[in-house]
Image (tube, coloured by chain):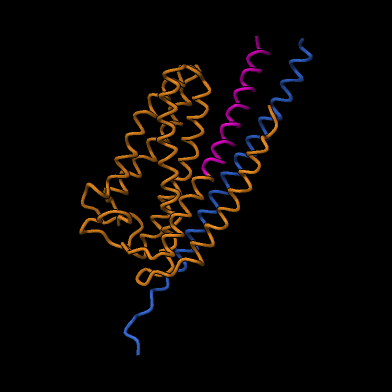
Amino acid sequence: MSFLTPPPDTSGYMIAGYAIAFGVMLLYVISLAVRFRSLQQDLMTLQDLDETKS
Amino acid sequence: MKSKPFTLTILDIVSLILLGISTYLALVFAPTEAVMGQVQRVFYFHVATAWVGMLGFIAAGLTGIAYLRSGNLKWDHIEVAAVEISLVFFFLAIVLGAIWARPVWNTWWTWDPRLTTAAITELIYIAYFMLRQGIEDPERRARFGAVYTLIGAVSVPITFMAIRLFRTIHPVVIGTPSAEAQGGFNMTGDMKTAFFFALFAFTIIFIDLFWNRIRLGELADQVEQLKLKIMR
């Protein structure tokens, strides 16, 4: 007979924590990629404009 | 814009691998804590995200000094990058802390000194972006940002020391906890491995994201300069 009580089941909180951590990090990386792509497109358009102007 | 440096691509891959290993150590390798159960595993990412959050805010303060001394706008781009990434990680630390607190303290949030100072720090840096948007002139904006981050950085040691200076229920993992601390635990050897590896992994991830974000700032600056040239 064991006198030790098993730890409470708090796995739902753990799963929620890691899901949020990975979700937020993924969203941030996607936001970096989207902003980078958009700026690259802007740069190309502006370079074309600059060439036609000069 | 120069193509992506090879070292940065390697760093991206290394960061992903380290994140994977850190997750394995936290979720599988480290033993289950006897009193709190599985939720204690949130602690590894909670401390690591808080650490890199604070690291970035301090880095922003230092780049603020560098800008004020040199007047070079490149320091402003670095400062913005540091604050943005730290805001994301510090937000994560606060959310993970609330998730841990729910089963352990029986509440999502309490106005404890550590939680309060952490929330104030996050709000200070959210305000940084809001206030920057109101300034048109890049040099004035950079000067304001430099002074703001320098003053804002004071909130970091206050937040860090809050659990060591005040009566608080927030546990102290390294050092002597206050008598009111709830949810503290002694780390076993395997827990220490997962803990210190998470700190290391998130530091590398921070450096990787920081570098990528600085490149984004440089590209934005290039676009801005070209726009001004065409409009002239």
Residue B147 % position (x, y): 38, 24
- Compared to A15, does B154 lie above or below? above
Residue A38 % position (x, y): 67, 33
Tell which residue pokes out farthest to the front in this image: B189
Let me know if residue B205 is in the magenta part: no
Where the N terminus of chain B falls, by quadrant?
top right
In the figure, what tint was chain A given?
Answer: blue
Q: Is residue B64 left or right of residue B216?
A: left
Residue B167 % position (x, y): 21, 52
* Magenta range: B206-232
Q: Residue at x 37, y 68 (%)?
A: B36
Decide whether the magenta segment is chiefly helix, strand or loop: helix
- Compared to A43, does B7 lie above or below? below
Q: Residue at x 43, y 34 (%)?
A: B59
Residue B121 sits in quarter: top left
Q: Nearer the viewer, residue B229 or B172?
A: B172
In the figure, what tint was chain B given?
Answer: orange
- Compared to A31, does B190 lie above or below? below
Tell which residue pokes out farthest to the right in this image: A52
Let me know if residue B212 is in the magenta part: yes
Q: Residue at x 43, y 57 (%)?
A: B195
Residue B187 sits in quarter: bottom left
Residue A54 % position (x, y): 77, 10
Q: Nearer the viewer, residue B163 or B8?
A: B8
- Compared to A52, does B119 lie above or below? below
